[in-house]
Amino acid sequence: MIPFDIPRPDQVNEPQQEGRGARPYSPLQLIFLLRLARLLRQRQEYLNVLAPEDWRLRLLNKAIYSTYCDCLEQGIADDAKALFERDKATNRA
């Protein structure tokens, strides 16, 4: 479960409705958030299989960093950080 609500594609450019917790995202913001979530999920899976110094895991970490930078540029740093917090909590469990 993602700590924020991702609206349906037809709601992306609509103003936020009163009483709803969902934050509207532009299509580009949504792409970067979904990409970051997917990359973090992949890293979680590969941590159990690959050695930390394996080139594939290093490449995945670089892709995560690059996507995080894209999220910063799009003004969704708090949402990206929430994904990292969720990932960290998953690693502890």
Image (cartoon, rainbow, N blue to C red):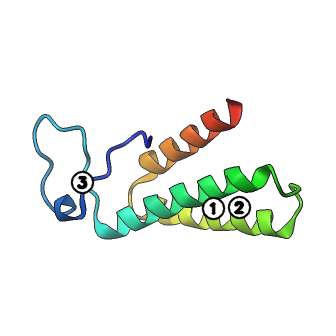
Residue drawn at x 13%, y 34% is: 19
Dividing the picture into quadrants, the one containing residue 27 is: bottom left
Q: Quadrant of the N terminus?
A: top left
Residue drawn at x 56%, y 38% is: 85
Task: Look at mark 3 in the image and give the residue it sits on.
Answer: 24
Apparent side of residue 8 relative to residue 92 in the rendered image (left or right): left
Dividing the picture into quadrants, the one containing residue 63 is: bottom right
Quick one: SS at disc 1? helix
- The answer to whether 55 is drawn above or below residue 11 in the figure is below
Apparent side of residue 87 relative to residue 14 in the rendered image (left or right): right
- Rendered location of residue 75, percent (x, y): 38, 57
Q: Which mark is residue 65?
A: 1
The amino acid on which the numbered mark 3 sits, given as a three-letter code, is Pro
Quick one: SS at disc 3? loop
- Rendered location of residue 74, percent (x, y): 39, 63
**Count of marks, rendered view:** 3
- Rendered location of residue 36, percent (x, y): 53, 59
Instruction: Tell me the distance, in whole angstroms, between the alpha carbons under discs 2 and 1.
Output: 6 Å
- The tag earlier along the polypeptide, 1 or 3, is 3
At label 3, counting other C-alpha atoms closer than 10 Å, the crowd grade (few under 14, some 14-19, many 20 or more) is: many
- The tag earlier along the polypeptide, 2 or 3, is 3
Residue drawn at x 44%, y 58% is: 33
Apparent side of residue 21 relative to residue 80 in the rendered image (left or right): left
Instruction: Tell me the distance, in whole angstroms, between the alpha carbons under discs 1 and 3.
Output: 24 Å
Q: Please identify, in this view, whether the residue under mark 2 or under mark 1 is nearer the observer.
A: 2
Q: Which mark is residue 61?
A: 2
